[in-house]
Amino acid sequence: MQETPFSLRVGHLLPYSMSDSNTTDFTNPSSFILLGIPGLEAAHVWISIPFCTMYAIAVLGNFIILFIVKIDPSLHAPMYYFLCMLAVTDLVLSTSTVPKMLSIFWFNSREIDFNACLTQLYFIHCFSAMESGILVAMAVDRYVAICKPLRHSTILTSPVVGKIGLAVVLRSSILVLPNPFLARRCPYYRTNIIPHTYCEHMSMVKLACADIRINNYYGFSLIFLITGVDVFFIALSYTQILRAIFSLPTKDAWVKTFWTCSSHLFATLAFHIPSLFSILTHRFAQNVPLHFHILMANMSILVPPMLHPIIYGFKTKQIRNRLLWLFTHKGPKVFSWCSGSKANHRAELAGDMVLSPLS
């Protein structure tokens, strides 16, 4: 017996069908249908296993980071404030996509309300931009800790860190805000079936039988205003950091100092490489198979939240020791604030070593 096509099987869920799309005149559908990963529907259950595992690690790891920083006063420093911001952003970013994705894989729950789709679109793009901005702030913290260690405590005070965090939130919220409105203004005539696991801006507007040049132009502008600017400032920070490192007298000092930046560098690469690959393939690589593009888009959402707590938990001695102490009560306690050089203490917090002035 021949299997009924999916588009016909869910016809009762659709506000319109593909067959009458040319005769029905309306502004927006009431809901969309997310296909998941087109071409790999038979493997959805198997794909869900690593996705669910990565999500569980991301949630557990980021909550542990937040808990450890909260209970340990010695971690109340700029580096760890930024790390907490990154953890919250990772939690929101992954939670805005993965539960619906898993419901598609496990329960074939493909329908999503139109307004819920726009909300998910906004959260994905907003918190992706926010995460990029936080990584820039962490790069600035690395620059100050290495290049101006004696002034670290006076430059990056708690009010300054708060203002940086507020600026990152406002920039992302305001710049991404037009996206859902631009998507809403498009009339959707052809179909309401989105070949994706979540509501992404370009995947939605490509369904519209209308001029979407404004959407394309604004999407390109966001790439330059957010990703381009952030990558530029991160590269600029590391250029200054490398100049400071190479001015040190011995190779051993080079390695130790650069090691203090490795956590942030790994976190930055884990976020920007999958994200840039997904953006570029979506817009320019038309010959890339659709299922491969969707898988990479999901990796850009899942991999960074999973890797960030692992990277910082493994690389940061204070977090590692506190975690060991919490579980075994045998690890060394994390040191607390004490008298002495604040610069040296800040340097220890920054990279598990005391840095000498480089500026």
Image (cartoon, rainbow, N blue to C red):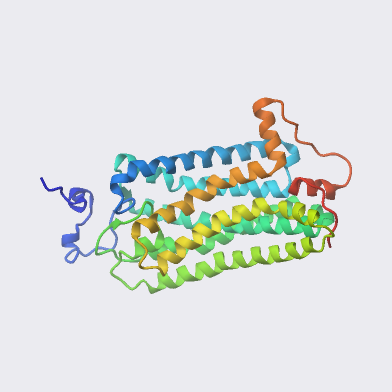
Q: Is residue 134 above or below residue 329?
A: below
| Drawn side of residue 221 relative to residue 69, left or right | left
What percent of the width, then of the height, locates residue 237?
Answer: 70, 63
Residue at left offset 59%, top offset 43%: 310
- Looking at the rendered structure, the number of numbered marks drawn on it comes to 0
- Report the residue at 72% width, 30% height from top: 331
Q: Where is residue 135 in the image (x, y as percent from the top left)?
A: 62, 56
Q: Nearer the viewer, residue 133 or 332?
A: 332
Residue 180 visible from this viewpoint: yes
Question: For the N terminus, which image quadrant?
Answer: top left
- In this view, which residue lies farthest toward the top? 329
Position of 333 with respect to 280 (left or right) is right
Residue found at x 48% / y 42%? 54
Tell me if I can see residue 156 in this picture. Answer: no
Residue 178 versus residue 5 in the image, above or below: below
Give the quadrant of the C terminus: bottom right
Q: Which residue lies furthest to the front in this view?
A: 251
Give above or below for 316 relative to 266.
Answer: above
279 to the left or right of 167: left
The part of the image, by quadrant, that contains residue 309 is top right
* Picture coordinates of residue 112, whole percent (x, y): 33, 49
**Residue 239 locus on image (x, y percent):** 71, 66
Q: Is residue 63 left or right of residue 74?
A: left
